[in-house]
Image: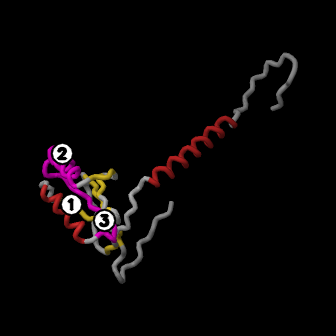
Amino acid sequence: MAAHLGGDSDELMSEINVTPFVDIVLVVLIIFMVTATAIVRQAIEVKLPDAATGSTAEDTSLAITIDAKKAWYLDGEPVTAGDLRVALRAARADKGDDVVCLLAADHAVPHGEMVRLIDVIKQEGVAKFAINIDPVPLPGDAPRSVATP
């Protein structure tokens, strides 16, 4: 449909102008890309050990991580042993004996540091914990197929 520049035209403009919509979509895309890279940079870098056997932890209350520098993190925030004890007590007061800790440690963390962490957890009355791993197939197992959309 052609528009008339002059004269008294009573025709309605029935075309949709998509340019503002495209501009908004591109701005939202740029904002998403910038914030996604900021979120990725805030992750704790931990190379989990490989294991062929393992299962998923269903009800994880607290996620505790030890990085390669032996720094402790509770749900992504740096903590000391004292801070962890306070958080464990609060979790037990809230959930009772249903508190489950998911432990993740870098493969370079000494065994003694992991034992120290488990000792702190058990001293606070938490008996349920799981150790996070990177699953690998058993020798002789068929490779897992990845579903593609």
**As drawn, is 83 to the left or to the right of 40?**
left
Q: Tell me what residue is drawn at x 39 percent, y 78 percent.
A: 142
**As drawn, is 36 to the left or to the right of 5?**
left
Mark 1 vs mark 3: which is more N-terminal? Answer: 3
Mark 3–mark 2 distance (CA, rounded to whole Å): 23 Å
Q: Secondary structure at mark 1?
A: strand
Mark 1 vs mark 2: which is more N-terminal? Answer: 2
> Relative to 42, does residue 117 appear above or below in the rendering?
below
Q: Position of residue 95 (x, y in %)?
A: 17, 46
- Say if mark 3 contacts mark 2, CB within 8 Å: no
- Which residue lies under the disc numbered 2? 90
Mark 1–mark 3 distance (CA, rounded to whole Å): 13 Å
Say how many tags the image has. Answer: 3
Span shown in magenta: 81-109
Q: Name the chief secondary structure element in magenta.
A: helix
Mark 3 vs mark 2: which is more N-terminal? Answer: 2
- Which residue lies under the disc numbered 3? 105
Identity of the residue furthest to the top in this view: 8
Q: Secondary structure at mark 2?
A: helix
Q: Position of residue 7 (x, y in %)?
A: 87, 17
